[in-house]
Amino acid sequence: MQTFEKYPVRSELADRFESMVSMRRDLHQHPELGFHEVRTSGVVTRELEQAGLAFRSGIAKTGVATLVPGTGESGRTVLFRADMDALPIHEENAVEYRSVHDDTMHACGHDGHTTILLHTLFEAHVGSARPSVDVKYVFQPAEEGPGGAKPMIDEGVLLEPQVEAAFGLHLWNTMPAGKVAVTSGPFMAAADEFEIRITGVGGHAAYPHEAVDAVLIGAHVVVALQTLVSRNADPTKTAVVSIGAFHGGSAFNVLPPEVRMRGTLRTFDEELRSLLIRRLREVAVGTAAALGGRAEFDFIDGYPTTVNDPRMAEFVREIACEVVGAENVLTDVISMGGEDMSYFLREVPGCYFFLGSQDRARGLDAAHHNPRFDFDEGVMPIGAEIFLRIQDRYLERFPEPPGRP
């Protein structure tokens, strides 16, 4: 039994399941990195052409958008979004649909997101589930970086017609298949990046007293940065500071004159974010100076916090309860991962939710961004069913435009 067969998913979506699997596996075999999703967007536009839909392509290089008119004449529009890009990871899965490209892989489920949204669109446009509201379907590049949502917005994807609400989902391998997480308010963290360059004085490793050891200074900086959350952040607020890259030196017996490191800051609270940005700089510069070196600190603004509008979150929660049952809907899940869906939700109210995709019994439980990532394809019709119910009931729930967040 497929996962979706346990739930009240309409027969039309069940009939499309083989098509979903075929498309998802094709996309999985041919992953493309951000702003290079030429083949992927080509698959999307080919399907839209076959469905007889007008569309706009080349938005933010490879993005695509199309409009499915509703049955009424409300003149109101909501947006459904899926991301299309893959990751620079070499796939280790021994499956027939494994990536044909070395060092590029769909390791986060975006192949599933694109498939779910396209099949939602098929059912809405040519099937029996015509929406009550106009729906703009957006296929976005570069979620994994450097970010495709903001460029699409800058190029007018929320206009002509004006979008008043936005919805999206993410397959989530840390939740069992069939679970749904819908959290009101802050849901995914702001994801920022920083770089630190430590400068010392190079020298022979046998004579450290004649040098200023940049590696040692860098090590002290890394340790000191781990005190920021525990000793600067309010314990009731959540934050993460992590160093993901540390580079310096090329020989065992040489003390290099320079070390470079890169890290990430994750927060939900803007006041705490500002504090930690300031303290990151102070700790790096101060620690290096105390040990006789020098530190340069650069901060790169990343995706803002993904914040779900409480009205929209409650609406999606009610629909999810209908589809998978209230016992399978979680309302307190937050993630320190970042998402550029956040840009859409800063412009219009909306809701981003997780659809559980883990099946441990079948070995489908690898974490996101893992070279063995894969998910239960049987949840894809569930995602489409939730989207279809959102579009069908939106005007009933919101007879008046909800206004900006």
Image (cartoon, rainbow, N blue to C red):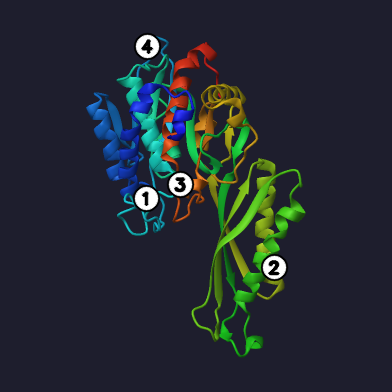
Q: Amino acid at mark 1?
A: Leu
Residue 24 placement (x, y as % from top left): 35, 40
Dots 1 and 3: beta carbons under 8 Å?
no
SS at badge 4: loop
Q: Which residue is mark 1?
A: 33
Nearest to the eye among marks 1 and 3: give it.
3
What SS does tag 2 mark? helix
Dot 3 or dot 2: first in sequence order is 3
Which is more N-terminal, label 3 or label 1?
A: 1
Residue at the spot x=43%, y=50% of the render?
A: 107
Report the mark closest to the observer, 1 or 2.
1
Q: Is residue 400 above or below residue 141?
A: above
Q: Foreground: 73 or 59?
A: 73
Residue at figure coordinates x 48%, y 16% from the top left: 393
The residue labelled by disc 4 is: 71
The crowd level at tag 3 (other Cα within 10 Å; few <14, some 14-19, many 20+) is: many
User: For the residue carrying disc 2, how many other residues have a C-alpha within 10 Å: few (<14), some (14-19), or many (20+)?
Assistant: many
- Residue 390 can be seen in this image: yes
Up-down relation of residue 315 to residue 245 (above or below): above
- Which quarter of the rendered picture does the N terminus lie within? top left
Q: Nearer the viewer, mark 3 or mark 2?
A: 3
Task: Give the spatial CA distance, label 1 vs label 3.
Answer: 12 Å
Write the residue at 61% across / 57% down: 242
Residue assigned mark 2: 287
The residue closer to the viewer here, 220 or 13, is 13
